Amino acid sequence: MGSKNKLKRFKENETFHNVYQPKRDELTGQDYELKGNWLNKVFKNDHPIVLELGCGKGEYTIGLAKRYPEKNFIGIDIKGARFWRGAKTAVDENISNAVFIRTQIELIEYVFEENEVDEIWITFPDPQIKYKRTKHRMTNLQFLDRYRKVLKPNGLMHLKTDSEFMHGYTLGLLQGIGHEVLYANHNVYKLEGSPEEVTQIQTFYENQYLEQDKAITYIRFKIN
């Protein structure tokens, strides 16, 4: 994507009512005004809140929002030029239960109050295979602890990935420390009984993986 196109998207994001771009010091320096208030100030309902972390173009956030109008969806990514696509789709199609936040995932506990979130989706994260990149792996112990803080006690986690490494690493970690694995599938498009929200919503890159006959994996779990 050219720099002019990126700049145009950044400018347009500033005009969208469904995009929130808090500065880092706004989040960490004091209580963020929307922390604990996403339902009454943004969605203006009492429906469950579902996050997509590292939402990219926002395809999954939008797909889930269309499928589940009785839930509120928030796509989070640091790259605003990417989720511009999802935000614009939501505006154009009047999808009122989907919004986007431009921030880093490690700041999630500054964005949401304890027990404010019902579900979290992580879709096709970078597996960060090299050992020195482990701290950036989105299902490591530090990230799981951040998710636990904002999730409700029985909140659900979803991991969908094309990385066998990420699938195996996460499954082993969860089972090793006693978290509750509710469902695990190493090839959701080849095995029967896969959840519909896993197979009927696909991202741009996921379609490319499927064309290459790459297995798509999925884990649903709870953080105890």
Image: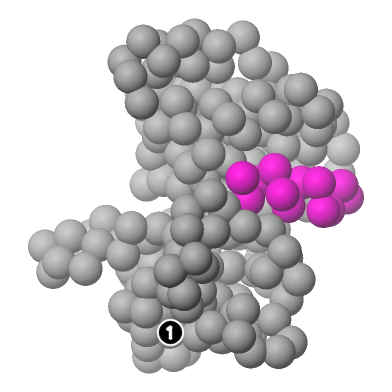
The quarter holding residue 62 reads top right
Q: Position of residue 109 (x, y in %)?
A: 48, 46
Quarter of the image holding residue 15? Answer: top right
Majority SS type along the magenta span? helix
Give the extent of the magenta segment: 59-70
Front in this rendered view, residue 200 or 158: 200
Q: Residue at x 40, y 58 (%)?
A: 125
Q: Quadrant of the C terminus?
A: bottom right
Pick the quarter of the image with the N terminus: top left
Q: Which residue is mark 1?
A: 171
Q: Position of residue 149 (x, y in %)?
A: 52, 58
> Toward the viewer: 219 or 35?
219
Q: Nearer the viewer, residue 32 or 77?
A: 77
Horizontal side of 134 relative to 192 (left or right) equals left
Q: Is residue 124 above or below residue 188?
A: above
Type of amino acid under label 1:
Leu
Q: Name the side, left or right, on which 116 lies relative to 11.
A: right
Q: Is residue 140 above or below residue 69?
A: below
Identify the residue at image location x=72%, y=49%: 63
Tell me if 180 is positioned left or right of 209 in this view: right
Q: Is residue 62 magenta?
A: yes
Where disc 1 sits, the SS reads: helix
Residue 49 seen by the camera: no
Is 203 inside the magenta-drawn segment?
no
Few, some or many residues within 10 Å of mark 1 (<14, 14–19, 20+): some
Name the residue: 37% across, 47% down: 106
Vertical comparison of 40 with 61: above or below: above
Q: How many marks?
A: 1
Picture residue at 83% right of the left edge, 26% below the top: 94
Q: Position of residue 201 (x, y in %)?
A: 68, 58
69 versus 145 height, above or below:
above
Residue 128 seen in this snapshot = yes
